[in-house]
Image: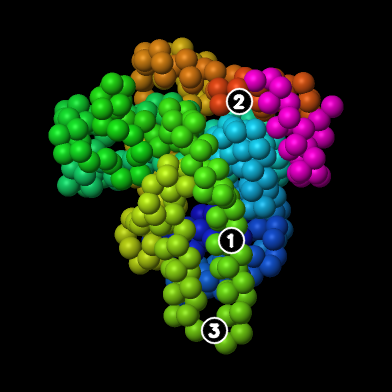
């Protein structure tokens, strides 16, 4: 098997490689191609990751050439960010000027990120169709749901699945609360990417979600990483994904970010600048232990502050800190998908795929985030049937925004872009949408598609 990863200049690459090497024998992995357009960051990630690869006998190629990476690949993982972290800062800061949520993937930030990213993912898909037409594309590039739908419905390529680690993180948190293994639980999950709900938590064939909520109410506890009051979850009859904090507590999230004086993107930018500067100093004569300690210190500092600004919570330990621990984040989701699609095992995962009738009220080709069955190049979403009108209404409004955003990127249409942004439930008025869009066009410059 040949596995290619597009976008390895980011700081999660060593974690991804750790997951790949754990599965090398199971996947019969013979070739690994690691590609990024940023040659400097590629070199620095090599410095961190090479000790992991040195003794495993895996043919590994680090490259800036996308064609070299993709040619003949069986599986391709995409995890790139157009414009880097500095574009994320723009995405988040512009709407805050108008007291509108500034967040990486949700609302205007996700809109701007999608407009920059769709033309680039289409270029990679063209290469895949030419050089590796039978490959599976496992997409982690955000906003994952929009990108996956753009490829499925507009690029003529259906061997793609979008992944996100939030649902699997919810499963781990629930398992830890219950004192059971994550695999012992089955979650009935439905929604869109970063807009989803757990409707049932099944253990030994029984839905115990009501018992979980009642236990939380009685103890006054909250589930780690889920900023919702147990009474609110009882009212919903579901457990929302953490990103629904931005919809259910919009004003609070905006006020928290403004009060903090910086967005999450700015926080990450500072951390990344510090990490890459320190890593650059270690290029000559660095010890493997010194590099490992620096990398783990970076993960520690990043994990402790996750969602702290937006929710107003105190910094906490995210859990995934040491490279030696067993829990996996997005790399576990991505590589679990590869395991199942390759036939190494059967599995269930929460993924971004065409609806195929799984959720009543959504279109058959709408990409939704839902519990799926996987085995040997087969992905089938499980039937959720009808869902609460409150959730369906929000999903349909956001889905229309997603469709228009994709069309705006494809056709270079200012009118469609403005319509998409104005329809998003987190944007209050047409006038505010127009100001945000015009500011994005000016601030992003050539990285933004030309809109006419």
Most foreground residue, 279 or 134: 279
Which residue bears the numbered disc 1? Answer: 270
Label located before the other in sequence (1 or 2): 1
Tag shown at residue 286? 3
Label 1 vs label 3: CA separation?
23 Å
Query: On the picture, is 2 further left or further right than 430?
Result: left
Query: On the picture, is 18 further left or further right than 131?
Result: left
Q: Are marks 1 and 2 in contact (CB under 8 Å)?
A: no
Task: State which region is magenta.
Answer: 429-452
Q: Residue at x 61, y 64 (%)?
A: 273
Which residue bears the numbered disc 2? Answer: 427
Q: Residues within 10 Å of mark 1 (few under 14, many from 20)?
A: few
Q: Position of residue 242 (x, y in %)?
A: 40, 37
Label 3 vs label 2: CA separation?
49 Å
Tag shown at residue 365? none
Taking the image as drawn, is residue 65 in sight? Answer: yes
Most foreground residue, 246 or 183: 246
Query: On the picture, is 185 further left or further right than 125?
Result: left
Q: Residue at x 31, y 45 (%)?
A: 224
Q: Residue at x 46, y 12 (%)?
A: 361
Taking the image as drawn, is residue 373 in sight? Answer: no
Q: Position of residue 31 (x, y in %)?
A: 55, 61
Q: Position of residue 346 (x, y in %)?
A: 34, 40
């Amino acid at each position: 098997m040949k596995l290619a990863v597009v976008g390895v200049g980011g700081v999660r690459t060593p974690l991804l490689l750790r997951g790949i090497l754990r599965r090398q024998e199971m996947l019969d992995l013979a070739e690994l191609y690691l590609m990024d357009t940023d040659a400097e960051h590629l070199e620095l990630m090599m410095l961190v990751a090479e000790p992991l690869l040195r003794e495993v006998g895996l043919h590994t190629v680090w490259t800036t050439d996308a064609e070299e990476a993709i040619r003949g690949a069986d599986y391709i993982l995409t995890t790139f960010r157009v414009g880097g972290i500095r574009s994320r800062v723009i995405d988040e800061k512009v709407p805050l000027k108008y007291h509108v949520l500034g967040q990486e993937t949700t609302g205007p930030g996700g809109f701007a990120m999608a407009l920059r990213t769709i033309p680039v993912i289409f270029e990679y898909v063209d290469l895949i169709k030419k050089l590796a037409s039978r490959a599976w594309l496992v997409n982690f590039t955000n906003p994952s749901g929009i990108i996956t739908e753009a490829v499925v419905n507009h690029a003529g390529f259906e061997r793609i699945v979008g992944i996100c680690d939030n649902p699997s993180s919810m499963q781990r948190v629930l398992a830890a609360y219950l004192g059971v293994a994550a695999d012992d639980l089955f979650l009935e999950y439905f929604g869109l990417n970063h807009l989803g709900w757990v409707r049932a938590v099944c253990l030994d064939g029984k839905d115990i979600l009501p018992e979980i909520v009642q236990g939380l109410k009685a103890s006054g506890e909250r589930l780690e990483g889920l900023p919702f009051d147990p009474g609110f979850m009882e009212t919903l009859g579901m457990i929302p994904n953490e990103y629904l904090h931005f919809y259910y507590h919009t004003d609070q999230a905006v006020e928290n970010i403004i009060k903090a004086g910086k967005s999450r993107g700015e926080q990450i930018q500072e951390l990344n600048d510090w990490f890459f500067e320190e890593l650059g100093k270690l290029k000559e004569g660095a010890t493997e232990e010194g590099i490992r300690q620096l990398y783990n210190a970076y993960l520690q500092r990043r994990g402790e502050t996750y969602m702290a600004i937006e929710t107003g919570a105190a910094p906490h330990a995210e859990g995934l800190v040491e490279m030696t621990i067993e829990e996996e984040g997005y790399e576990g989701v991505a590589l679990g998908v590869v395991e199942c699609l390759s036939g190494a095992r059967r599995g269930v995962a929460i993924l971004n795929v065409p609806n195929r009738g799984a959720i009543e009220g959504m279109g058959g080709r709408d990409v939704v985030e839902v519990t799926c069955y996987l085995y040997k190049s087969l992905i089938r979403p499980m039937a959720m049937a009808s869902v609460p009108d409150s959730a369906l209404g929000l999903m349909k409004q956001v889905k229309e925004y997603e469709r228009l955003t994709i069309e705006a990127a494809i056709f270079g249409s200012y009118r469609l872009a403005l319509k998409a942004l104005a329809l998003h439930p987190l944007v209050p008025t047409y006038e505010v949408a127009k100001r945000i869009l015009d500011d994005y066009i000016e601030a992003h410059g050539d990285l933004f598609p030309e809109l006419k």
